[in-house]
Amino acid sequence: MHQIDASGIRKVFDLAATMQAPINLSIGQPHYDTPPEIKQALCRAVEEGRNAYSQTQGIAPLLKQLQHHTDECYDHSNRQVFVTSGTSGALMLALCALVNPGDEVIVFDPWFVMYKHLTTLAGGKVVQISTYPDFRIDLDQVKAAITDRTRVILFNSPANPTGAVASVEEVRGLAELAAERDIALISDEIYRLFCYDDEFHNPAAWNSDTIVIDGFSKSHSMTGHRLGYVHGPDYVIQQMMKLQQFTFVCAPHPVQWAGVTAWDLDMSGRATEYRGKRDLIVSELGDQFEVHGGQGAFYLFLKAPWGTGTEFVAEAIRNNLLIIPGNVFSEQDTHFRISYAAEDEVLKRGAEVLRNVAAAGPP
Ligand SMILES: Cc1ncc(COP(=O)(O)O)c(C=O)c1O
């Protein structure tokens, strides 16, 4: 545990605790509540007494829906699905199942915070490939980073914190490279719904061994419910399920019943709404900030116009705007993350603070 440093995030929370009614563009979850149909299904499940453990792999009706969808998307005879305790749970199981002490896991910098720490927990070592300044994946850099110890490539599109959506060439290139070199490819697709410009591409289309991690947290605004799922080759899934049996046991049982209802809901209206928010924030900031990425999810990762990311964020916080310094997600401290999962009026006020802090220069 001493090798895991959570001080960056903690500092932001400490600062946030001193703020009164901040303009909050730091939150990594939708601003809308869980849809009422899902809440009702959850209440019903609790009332009906579905409160005991479920089978480790998940309840049959949800598994059936997920497996059906997976079989429709991929023609992989051994692709198996199981239900996890959030995407985070699936990530932990995958890394613990695949990584031996000393193994290397390739991640793309900036990365989602958990990747580094869960790799460390599994005894592995992250090998970071920078995607600055445009957050594109350079396949030559990936090839150069592969060693005899490379066990996993961890890929996330649409990405947190950059909002970048990988192009078909990037996804296909990465998928084929992983297959050629016999390296496990984990694809974290939790923001799949939120793709605004181009189509979403899944590496499993070119690499039948891809381990796909997904969940209901972001698309259905169920972050507190802890419901995710994973599909991949059955021999990996079996090992992950074994570990789930002895760690998480199962995903929360009544929530799985809510998931059955959630699966059939059309959430595409939310993606359209968030595309509008992305356009709004880019039009508010585009003149003063360089915008790269931002084709999906609900984040922008912007270069601080002066000082380090931390210095710029500290000044924004002094002006009552809560955002996250880039070094929480990266080896470098040059950027900051904003989440535009907020009301338009909040976005406009936040953008105004950012413009003013940028124009004023260092204090
Ligand atoms: C890229 C990414 N993966 C996984 C997660 C974890 O999601 P869950 O709530 O399903 O555990 C998050 C949450 O912020 C995320 O941004």
Image (cartoon, rainbow, N blue to C red):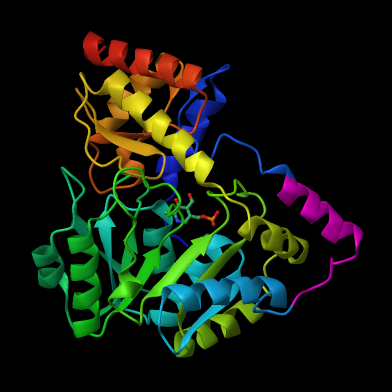
Residue 144: image x %, image y %? 10, 70
Q: Is residue 163 visible?
A: yes
Is 18 placed above or below 120 here?
above
Residue at image coords 53%, 49%: 219
Q: Is residue 294 left or right of residue 82?
A: left
Q: Residue at x 36, y 80 (%)?
A: 101
Tell me: residue 362, above or below residue 220. Answer: above
**Front one among 112 and 61:** 61
Locate residue 11 relative to residue 307 in the image: left or right: right
- Identify which residue, 289 or 323, lies in the foreground: 289
The magenta stretch spans which residues? 37-54
Specify whether residue 59 is in view: no
Residue 343 in the image: above or below residue 193: above
- Left or right: 326 in relation to 13: left
Q: Image point 48% across, 27% down: which residue?
A: 15
Q: Is residue 130 magenta?
A: no
- Image location (x, y in percent) of residue 190: 46, 56
Say left or right for 66 vs 324: right
Q: Quadrant of residue 168?
A: bottom left
- Image quadrant assignment for residue 146: bottom left
Give residue 131's position: percent from left, percent from top. Answer: 19, 51
The main secondary structure of the magenta stretch is: helix
Residues 263 and 163: in front is 263
State the image coordinates of residue 127 (x, y, percent, origin top left): 24, 65
Q: Quadrant of the C terminus?
A: top left
Please give the count of numbered marks on the rendered protein.
0
Magenta-colored stretch includes residue 50: yes
Image point 68% across, 43% down: which residue? 35
